[in-house]
Amino acid sequence: MSDRPTAPAGIDPRGPRFAASITAFLLAVAVILGLTGLSTSRSFGWFAYQPLSNSTFPGDRAWDITIASLAERIADPAFLLLLVIALLFVWGVAWPRTAPWGVLFRRVVRPRLKPPTDLEDARPPRFAQGVGLFVVTIGLVLHLFGVPWALPISAAAAFIAAFLNAVFGLCLGCQLYLVLQRAGVVGRARPAV
Amino acid sequence: MTLVEALIGLAVLLAATVAAGFVVRWNQGRAHHHVPHEVVQPARLGADGLGDVATLLQFSTELCSRCPGVHRTLSAVADARPGVRHLDVDLTHRPDIAKHFHVLQTPTTLILDRNGIVQTRFGGVPRRDVIEMELARLSGAETDPQPEAEPERV
């Protein structure tokens, strides 16, 4: 009973944390770009000065993103960076062995470190990449639909998870997995033996 | 929003994240004694029995990066002490057990006494010295009977 079947192949646990630190940095930049960019900017819309405008009181300012065209929403630097991060998440979920930060870790970082004291299962970090992809995708989609603040908030949520993973080694993905499982979304109950 | 305001926003986010990380880490190594002192039936967990002195009951999932490390630690602790047994229950396919013990994070570790009664609970990665202390308390209780009420107030 004490011998749990171990995972077929283990990975160096410092690899995912290294990747998470790069992801956290990129997400921090995305938060900055999102806060300074189209997503949160408000200006005195030209229609707001019209007497028949839909503003409720004088000086009400419209969100720029709600009147921006789809092309303008896509061209927002924060959107583009978060899109790149999302694609990196897709890479990490679909082909974890060739994901760029993992390759960088194995080629450049690990040769300079001591050998790992123990290996860990490769599936939890992969699941966590999927959670990150989910969170970031929500922000991207809402941004395309012209929802203000969606981009920086989703980037911030993903940043929190990546930062806690990189610095504290906390796996929010594991906990989410259990919550989802208790809700009956994932994992099937095996008949009690 | 100006760049300065955005940087202030990022600094607030960073500070909140670091604070949350420290709170979670501080909370995880701790032993919780205010738990339902229920009797655990080993058969329900798929085990053939419990330890003679104490049982370290660990709950894990397949998608848990820190469970294998805790597994090794608890196994080493159990091996070093006669009568202490380490059980590792995989909750991946047993949401019924997760629900019963209100497991919301893995690893979660329960320390059972000789009668299979839950005495201590750890959420997250337990500290080895705290585990040793709890076991010493349990094995000491048989020779030196202590009052029923736990003076613990953590």
Image (cartoon, coloured by chain):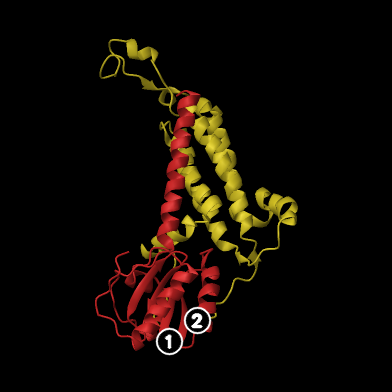
Amino acid bearing label 1: Gly
Please, what is the three-letter code of the amino acid marked with disc 2?
Ala
Horizontally, residue A154 falls left or right of residue B143, namely right
Residue B145 at what x, y percent from top left? Answer: 30, 85
Q: Is B137 placed left or right of A119 in the picture? A: left
Label 1: which secondary element: loop
Residue labelled with disc 2: B78
Q: Which of A41 and B79 is in front in this view?
A: B79
* Residue drawn at (42%, 79%) of the image: B136
Decide: is B69 above or below A131: below
Asked whether the residues under the numbered discs 2 and 1 touch, taking CB atoms below 8 Å apart as contact, a structural biologist would say: yes
Above or below: residue A141 compared with residue B46: above
Q: Colour of chain A?
A: yellow
Q: In which quarter of the image is the C terminus of chain A?
A: bottom left
Label 2, label 1: how many angstroms apart (C-alpha)?
9 Å
Which one of the lettered chains is coloured red? B
Q: Which chain does the residue under circle 2 lie in? A: B
Would residue A190 be found to the left or right of residue A50 on screen? right
- B125 relative to A48, above or below: below
Residue drawn 51% across the image and 68% down it:
B67
Q: Which residue is drawn at 51% across and 32% down?
A: A32
The x, y position of residue A16, in whole percent, is 60, 55
For label 1, the crowd category at 10 Å Cα-Cα, with few meaning under 14, some 14 to 19 and many 20 or more, is: some
The picture places residue A65, in percent across and down from the top left corner, at 44, 26
Residue that badge 1 annotates: B51
* Residue farthest along the front direction in this orientation: B144
Across and down, in percent, residue A189 comes to: 40, 73
